[in-house]
Image (cartoon, grey):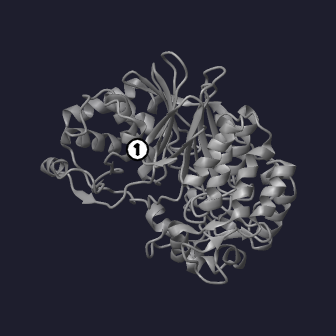
Amino acid sequence: MIEGQQIDSDVGAVAAEPEDSARVGARILAEGGNAFDAAAATCLAVPMRYPDKTGVGGYMMSAVVRDGTSGKIWSIDANSRAPAAAHDSMYDILPKGPAGLNESEYDCSVRDNANVYGALAVGVPGQLAGIGTLWERWGKLPWAQVVQPSLDMLADGFPYSEQTAASIRNNEEVIRRFPATAAHLLKDGAVPEPDDVWHRPDMEKTLERLATAGWRDFYEGQLARAMTDQLQAAGGILSADDLANYHPRVTEAYSARYRDTEIFGCILPNGPLSILQALNMLDHLPALSDDDPRWWHQMTEVLKLVWRDRLTYLGDPDYVDVPIERLLSRDYAAGRAEALRQFPDRVESDPWPAGSGGPETSHVSAADAEGNVVSATITQGGAFGSCFTIDGWGLILGHGMCRLDPRPGLSNSVAAGKRPLNNVGTMLLRSAEHDTALGLPGGRRIIAVMTQMAARLVDAGVTLHDTAVAPRMHVTTGEPLELGPDVPEEIEAGLTERGHRVERFHRIAGAAHGASFRTAGEGAAVSAGGSCWAAAP
């Protein structure tokens, strides 16, 4: 294990955060598992350490995978679905108040933040179904073997960590509203110190049940009954039928071409369509180096156009008419790019809410020597999701309902069975030499950063590690333009000269993780890069 570097392996490798979760994936590879087994085990292990970011009850998983046997690319959409009893006026909309998720995302307030915290914030949790489907369709090892490393982590215990302790402290007021959540997260009733040892009370019982009964128990068995009983007793609307009828969608991925590389992304209502659209436009513009202010200007203006389309058209295509074919077409991209050529210095302010862009998500990439490649993003939503914990099971549930717009009459408004629009940027890049999984956390900032990382991989030929740690920017429909702390001053000066309104941010999105399988040349080779990686010995 090395932090912040890149490794090559002739067996397989996993890139994920934290370190011990990446090691779980390497352990599975060493036990004879493939990249799908390793990714599934890692996606189960990450929530043990980072329950603020992800959870066994997390609201969604998005994945793009390469099946090494056929070479085919697949999309796995395990997004949350609104319960059958949901409707577009189920939340009490209030005038915009102090800053919060609703205020930043939807420019309004919701009474009691009922779509963010508590039983009414819970849609069907999709994360475990995504993990289970990944393993069930392509894995090799027994399911119990995939679960076991997470059980071992709990048995040994681990420090809360700086991150988890800080998340608990920052959300203490909400956590204490829910006794089961407080009992699970607090240390003897108090906010923990980072070095306090934690065993995740009752989570061992949940994992043992999943290991013996299978992952569908969460949707059809004892775990499902515990969830629906407690949620409905607290005023929630999730039903046994909502859980039993839930199945992830495994389909062909969306695709676009950038230079000589084909880019694949998970289907709507996940975020990659916007990234593919941005790369389509950039493909019609000059290939510049990122040490040139024009690269940053060009990226900025393309992303503004993409975000205007995103906020205008996108939603669950089962419920709204999304012009997917047009948005991904080369002709449409060429027309938008031509407008930028004619008006190269148009700089506009932002008429839309900026969005929170928090880092409460995790990404796992894995690859093996058989040519299996996995890009998977998992999330609770915001920190600790709904903050509603199933008593006796240690299950903190994600808040999928807050990813639907609480205001009625819009493309992403609440509706029964609807899947929320999200910003997850799960992608896979296919060149003549490599198939590469790539992703990162970061809310709305994912769209911009994934576009930059893909462009650097293709245009500059940098390593996975180098693109993961390169300087970043973010913009939505207009200025201000956010620059990370490591963007050179001469770049900022060049952007300012062009009329851009620039703000510096200490961080733009979270840690990126990538894994790659070499498809050309002699012998198989696997690479992984990001903040943490682990390779099979």
Label 1 crowding class (10 Å Cα cut-off): few <14, some 14-19, many 20+? many
Expressed as whole percent of the image width and height from the top left, the position of residue 133 reads 73, 40
Which residue is painted at 62% across and 42% down in the image?
A: 26
**Which of the image's four quarters has the C terminus?**
top right
Which residue occupies the foreground of this view, 260 or 478?
Answer: 260
405 lies above or below 450: below
Which residue is painted at 87% across and 54% down in the image?
A: 221
Which residue occupies the foreground of this view, 297 or 93?
Answer: 297
For residue 394, what is the image quadrant?
A: bottom right
Residue beneath label 1, please? 468
313 lies above or below 241: above
For residue 33, what is the image quadrant?
A: top right
Q: Secondary structure at mark 1?
A: helix
* Left or right for 499, reference 125: left
Q: Residue furthest top?
A: 522
Expressed as whole percent of the image width and height from the top left, the position of residue 148 reads 76, 51
* Left or right for 245, reference 297: right
Q: Residue furthest front?
A: 537
Q: Residue furthest bottom?
A: 189
47 lies above or below 108: above
Q: Give, as a three-letter code, the residue at label 1.
A: Ala
247 lies above or below 493: above
Which residue occupies the foreground of this view, 259 or 70?
Answer: 70
Expressed as whole percent of the image width and height from the top left, the position of residue 240 reads 83, 56
* Left or right for 515, reference 32: left
> Does any portion of residue 319 appear in the rendered image?
no
* Left or right for 505, reference 313: left
> Does any portion of residue 432 appear in the rendered image?
yes
Expressed as whole percent of the image width and height from the top left, the position of residue 183 reads 70, 77
Which residue occupies the foreground of this view, 60 or 359?
Answer: 359
Number of numbered discs on residues: 1
Which residue is painted at 32% across and 39% down in the image?
A: 302
